[in-house]
Image (cartoon, helix red, strand yellow):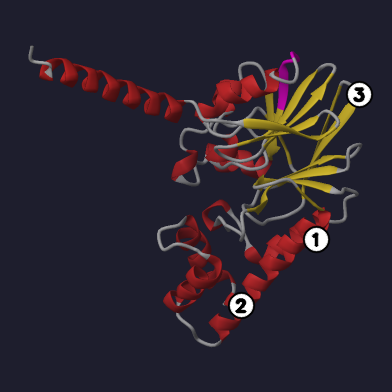
Amino acid sequence: MNRAPIIRAIAGTMFLSLAWFAYTQTQAPKLTISKVKADLYNIEGDGGNVGALVTSEGVILIDDKFDQDHDAIVAQVRSVTRQPIKYIFSTHHHGDHSGGNAKFLPTAEIVSTSMARANIVQQNQAKTADTVPGRMAFDHEFSIFLGGQEVRARYMGRGHTNGDAVIYFPALKVVHTGDLMAGASPLIDYPGGGSVVEWTRTLDEALKLDFDTVIPGHGKVTDKAGLKTYRDNVETLRNRVSAMIRQGKSQDEIGKMLTADYQWQPTSLNMQWSLPGMMRELR
């Protein structure tokens, strides 16, 4: 009996099964949820950190990741409560933080700074082209009171973009910074109104709040000292680039330093947005 056709058929079936498994894994991002304090949770994985405050009258989210994360976010929230998601605070307009807006808007109100909303409406960068703005916006401060708890959003100045909101949980002494703290070094979105000069001043204002725990835009939950260290690292980077500009160094030379010392890769958004913007802002 010639078994070759059978073996080829089995191999083909296995290949298709593995390909489908890989496809479905790509389509269904793996997210995890962990408790930060009391009824406040952090949802990690794929996109920015999502804060989730559970109250007796519903859930308040901070950011909603990418469009494809909607079902996984809802599943993670349902793993800790049956309360519906009623409000979402957007820290800024980028797709890894606000990309899920369209799917959440039918059942939840989304709140952002006026500047973040304008960035979405005006499509200030290609990655916001499919992002839908929320229906509610503020210029300086906005609070939601739900189930006896308060979540307060404040605009404290430019940094990562021109519309970053710091989200404050006063009773829990926790802040969610969005990408005002994210990764090892700052990504300054100059097309979106960001500023490396203003960034440290904005974090100085945030550090005046009474808190001890920080949910960053990306990365592990940390504390106030961790945010202060990040703020100082932004200042150090800015001072190094400013000094090189004063010495007459070229953009290419500064880029090589940033690649060597800060791991900014040649094709990264840091090199596309941050470096050219700093060359203009720090002259």
Residue drawn at x 50%, y 75% is 257
Q: Amino acid at mark 1?
A: Asp
Element at label 3? loop
Q: How many residues crowd around disc 3 within 10 Å: few (fewer than 14), some, or many (20 or more)?
A: few
Residue drawn at x 62%, y 25% is 73
Element at label 1? helix
Tell me: residue 207, above or below residue 5: below
Q: Nearer the viewer, residue 145 or 26?
A: 26
Residue 190 point in image, percent of width and height: 55, 58
Residue 238 point in image, percent of width and height: 63, 71
Sequence-first tag of 1 and 2 = 1
Q: Quadrant of residue 194?
A: bottom right
Q: Which residue is mark 1?
A: 204
Q: Are marks 3 and 2 in contact (CB under 8 Å)?
A: no
**The residue stretch that appears in magenta:** 82-87
Q: Which residue is mark 3?
A: 148
Q: Which residue is mark 2?
A: 240
Sequence-first tag of 3 and 2 = 3
Tell me: residue 268, above or below residue 35: below
